[in-house]
Amino acid sequence: MRSEFVANVSHELKTPLTTIKGFVETLKEGALNDPEKGKKFLDIIQKHTERLEYLVNDLLTLSAIENKGELLNLENISVLSVIEPVINLFKDRLENKHLSLILNIPENIPSLNIDRIKIEQVFLNLLDNAIKFTPSQGIISIGALVQDGFIRIDIKDTGMGIEEKYLPRLFERFYRVDKGRSSELGGTGLGLSIVKHIVQMHGGRVAVESDVGKGSTFSIFLPLKSS
Ligand code: ADP
């Protein structure tokens, strides 16, 4: 498991590093003197540097949640109090992409014993995906309900959807349906594995349903009574 992970990480690091190295060499060999080309190559270098940054950030998050010594910092809080600040972080991106966000969390829904920072990370990753994979004018809705001893939170989008055959592997580390497209959108393939890990740490589970061309619903189930 561990060596496979190291192999995957190395592979993910290799593409941006090779690209950056290649374009720096090309610049040094003369492209620097051509302002148009120079600017284009610097843009490419910037994009791949950002990729490295996203990757390292996700790896640090993953390592923090996997660190056995790090316990959950449980607080009795409402789901809404965790979701609202996350939504605020995405306000600009939602507006720029002309996406509507519908929040449907009943006021009387019980509060939960959860780690605020970690559950924020869950919503951060799920909303980030919903925004990335939903074309302009789409709708993202967040709903919550009590179901069989759990609070179920659904994040539903009207995006591109995912073919059924890909669903079983979706929460695996580094798994991406369309690697090129994910990279283009700044994805690392780690977001959903982080979501699953955090939810499981809380004694919960994750689920996904999707229709190609219509949209996807990612659901997280968090236990009402923490174990
Ligand atoms: P990434 O960094 O690529 O977003 P994730 O682990 O968050 O990695 O997601 C894995 C893959 O699952 C994505 O590359 C994409 O193919 C698919 N995916 C995740 N969320 C959605 C969504 N809301 N709509 C369509 N596809 C999605």
Image (spheres, rainbow, N blue to C red):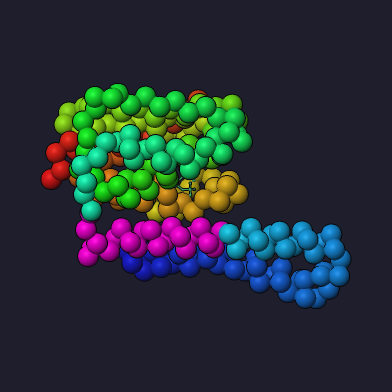
59 versus 129 height, above or below: below
Q: Is residue 50 left or right of residue 118?
A: right
67 versus 203 height, above or below: below
Can residue 100 be seen from the camera position used here?
yes
Residue 50 at what x, y percent from top left?
Answer: 58, 59
Residue 58 forms part of the magenta stretch: yes
Name which residue lies at 42% across and 45% down.
125
Q: Nearer the viewer, residue 136 or 215?
A: 136
- Per the rendered image, the range of residues in magenta is 51-72
Q: Is residue 82 left or right of residue 74?
A: right
Residue 32 at what x, y percent from top left?
Answer: 81, 70
Residue 74 forms part of the magenta stretch: no
Name which residue lies at 39% across and 32% down.
155
Residue 119 at what x, y percent from top left?
Answer: 32, 45
Kindly indicate the quadrant of the structure image that contains residue 107.
top left
Q: Nearer the viewer, residue 141 or 212?
A: 141
Magenta stretch, main secondary structure class: helix
Quarter of the image with the C terminus is top left
195 versus 87 height, above or below: below
Residue 217 at what x, y percent from top left?
Answer: 40, 31
